Amino acid sequence: MEFGGQEIGTVREAKYLLKKGHDVVIACQPGSRIAERCMNENVPFRSVPGMRKAALAPFTVAKALLLLLRYRPHVVHCHSAQDHWIFGSAARVLGIPIVRTRHNSVEPKKIWAVTFLYNRLTDRLITRGEIIREQLIEGAGCRPDRVSSIPLGVDVDEFSIKESPERTKEKLDLEGRRIVLCVAILRTWKGQEDLIRACSLLKSTYPDLTLLLVGDGVEKLRLERIAEDVAMTENVVFAGFRDDIPELMSCSDVMVLASRNFEGAPQVIPQAWAAGTPVISTPVGGIGEMVIDGVNGILTTPGHPEELASAIGRVLENRDYAENLVSGGRKSLEEGFTLEWSMQGTIDIYREVAS
């Protein structure tokens, strides 16, 4: 029901495919944020109640069968366990090829259900990072030739900013402030707590520092209390979910993703590269494959606010160093993190299984 990177990426892929002349329908839960986004952006979708309720599984599979019979797709592409079980089962009955994307680096459980799901109910697998690919091969027994690592790329055209950073800061009521930006759903493992504590350590050196937290989630109240405990209430802005990410990145001094675990290949990192914003993150999941410390970003130890504060201070203090990171990020973006690149790999897999 939430709307994080996985859902944002799914809609972005659908829009790309529609633009290229393919037919796409997103199946999702009624009342979900992704349904709302599809409606706002003219992406065809159909609501399928009960996808997260095991007791309703037989009825939900029946609904999925009817939906697939109506559209007769060449490929069914699943993105999480619930929709995979439901639509994977329905697609197998009808002989429709199944592609599954594994977005996070949670170790797959070595149980029969996981092995069955990733082998019997899947024709090809896409992972958001090489480390996730290795997890599926070793943990779920997937054949290496059936698993491809394809990080979701960035639509570079979205980051052709027309509005000045100063104007964006004015809209946010943050004129004259140094901005540390974090774009992530508010969950424990995203490390916003570490980032708040890191910024509190920098407050005396940079009294004009503002931490801009963009995203919604269940952790908001707890994070607000932490900000209060470390006297950062006036220096932390909880901006909620926003659509103007390119503008926010362009007016920020640094983009930080302090994840503690579970990451795949987060979209916000190549987005920051596209916006020309220095990146600081942690070597969690697929991030360690994307960010080369000191070249296209800075990597810090997860759960260490002091180290994180030192890295942020380095970027704020040394603009030449920050610009070198930006240049490295642009080069990495061009070499394999554009939307065109990632979607071509995905379409190739669609063609392979559909043939």
Image (cartoon, rainbow, N blue to C red):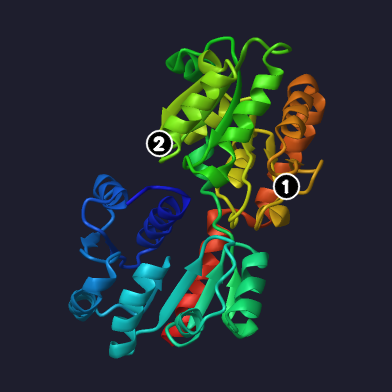
Residue 268 in sight: yes
Residue 164 in sight: no
Q: Residues within 10 Å of mark 1 (few under 14, many from 20)?
A: some
Is residue 70 left or right of 338 when viewed as pictured?
left
The tag earlier along the polypeptide, 1 or 2, is 2
Q: Secondary structure at mark 2?
A: loop
- Tag 1–tag 2 contact (CB < 8 Å): no
The quarter of the rendered structure image containing the C terminus is bottom left
In terms of depth relative to the viewer, which is nearer, 14 or 211? 211
Q: Which residue is mark 1?
A: 331
Residue 328 in the image, given as x and y percentages of width and height:
76, 42
Residue at horizontal 51%, vertical 43%?
157
Residue at horizontal 39%, vertical 62%?
17
Residue 134 higher or lower than 296, as above or below: below
C-alpha span from label 1 to label 2: 25 Å
Q: Quadrant of residue 132?
A: bottom right
Residue 331 in the image, given as x and y percentages of width and height:
72, 47
Label 2 amino acid? Asp
Residue 124 in the image, given as x and y percentages of width and height:
50, 80
Which dot marks residue 192? none
In terms of depth relative to the viewer, which is nearer, 14 or 77? 77
Q: Quadrant of residue 297?
A: top right
Is residue 306 left or right of 271 when viewed as pictured?
right
Residue at horizontal 59%, vertical 57%?
264
Residue at horizontal 52%, vertical 19%?
228
In terms of depth relative to the viewer, which is nearer, 71 or 258? 258
Q: Quadrant of residue 18?
A: bottom left
Label 1 amino acid? Lys
Q: Which residue is mark 2?
A: 243
In this view, the mark in front (1 or 2): 2
